[in-house]
Amino acid sequence: MAPGGPPSSAPALELRGLEKTYRGGRAALLGVDLQVAPGELVGLLGPNGAGKTTLTKIACGLVHPTGGTVLVDGHPVGTAAARRATGYLAELFRFPDWLTADEVLALHQRLAGSSGGSEERRGRLRDVGLADSGDLRVGAMSKGMQQRLGIAQALLGAPRIVLLDEPTSALDPVGRAIVRELLTALRDRGVGVLLSSHLLGEVERVCDRVAIVVDGRVVADDRPSVLTRAAGVELETDRGVRIVEGAGRDDAPALVAAAVADGERVYGVRVRRSTLEDVYREAVGGATDGGVQRR
Ligand SMILES: Nc1ncnc2c1ncn2[C@@H]1O[C@H](COP(=O)(O)OP(=O)(O)OP(=O)(O)O)[C@@H](O)[C@H]1O
């Protein structure tokens, strides 16, 4: 797959002190700092209304911030260079029903200033598992196919950062696996990805870093393995299953030995870690989220 130009040392995306108050509305972002390095896959989580879409739209130049700065591959957002370096898939998008997949991509090639021609279009359709659907009209596509076409569109040209707002919400498990492979390929090519999603399992599987936004602020930003933590050791014996709170990996052999010495038959031992979902629920506290899904 072609996205990704010559390597650059600048962050793929850099947000500093980002603020946004919509006219007549309440503040949507209250000083957000966030970086996406080249080749880094960052997941953006948060309850409905937390500010994820606002942040993503500011990063691609569609919404003006009321404070702070945005650099895309080192270029101020809104400049031609920043636009060329950005691929974007909106949360709620709709392509004209009467266009074919190939025509949608040709239109977006013109918008992105890409000279990749039919070869690029075929490549992007192949990337998203739509190799045989170039002549299919949007109106005849399932929601999942349209979403994959949307992702193909975001990869046209040579983006250094790809901003995806809920890109897998309509996808079945096979479609999600295709997108996971695609994201991994983007990482390998040094393209940064900011992936906004409510699908915590997907984010945990694929992202290098996770930022959690609550009420316009980033309340957690780290690798999933750092955000999650030890959550005891589970022992399964002939007396049942029990969790030894506070115990970690190093305690497992002694726990098994003690159980055996006590006459128990040990069938299993598992070192537990909290999941990203646990971390998320802790971070958002009481903020309700009708949209959160495990997978
Ligand atoms: N165009 C707008 N005018 C006024 N207020 C807006 C506008 N767009 C968003 N908001 C408000 O800004 C806040 C953040 O909304 P945003 O859509 O960025 O959240 P989100 O985290 O993407 O939510 P969701 O998960 O539901 O997509 C909300 O309070 C929302 O009502």
Image (cartoon, rainbow, N blue to C red):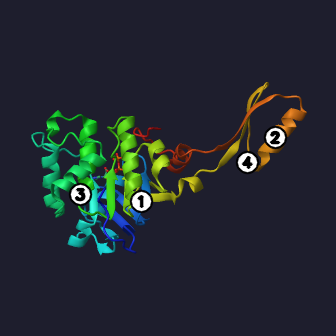
Residues under labels 2 and 3: Cα distance?
55 Å
| Amino acid beneath label 1 | Asp
Farthest residue in the left direction? Answer: 98
| Amino acid beneath label 2 | Leu
Labels 1, 4: front one: 1
Residue identified by numbered label 2: 255
Quadrant of residue 136 within the rendered picture: top left
Using the image as rendered, state which of residue 283 and residue 73 is in the foreground: 73
| Amino acid beneath label 4 | Arg
Residue 105 appears in the rendering = yes
The residue sitting at 17% across, 43% down in the picture is 134
Category of crowding for the residue at label 3, using alpha-carbon neighbours closer than 10 angstroms: few (below 14), some (14–19), many (at least 20): many
The image quadrant where one finds the N terminus is bottom left
Residue 79 appears in the rendering = no
Residues under labels 1 and 2: Cα distance?
42 Å
Labels 3, 4: front one: 3
Residue identified by numbered label 1: 188
Location of residue 258 with respect to 51 vertically, above or below: above
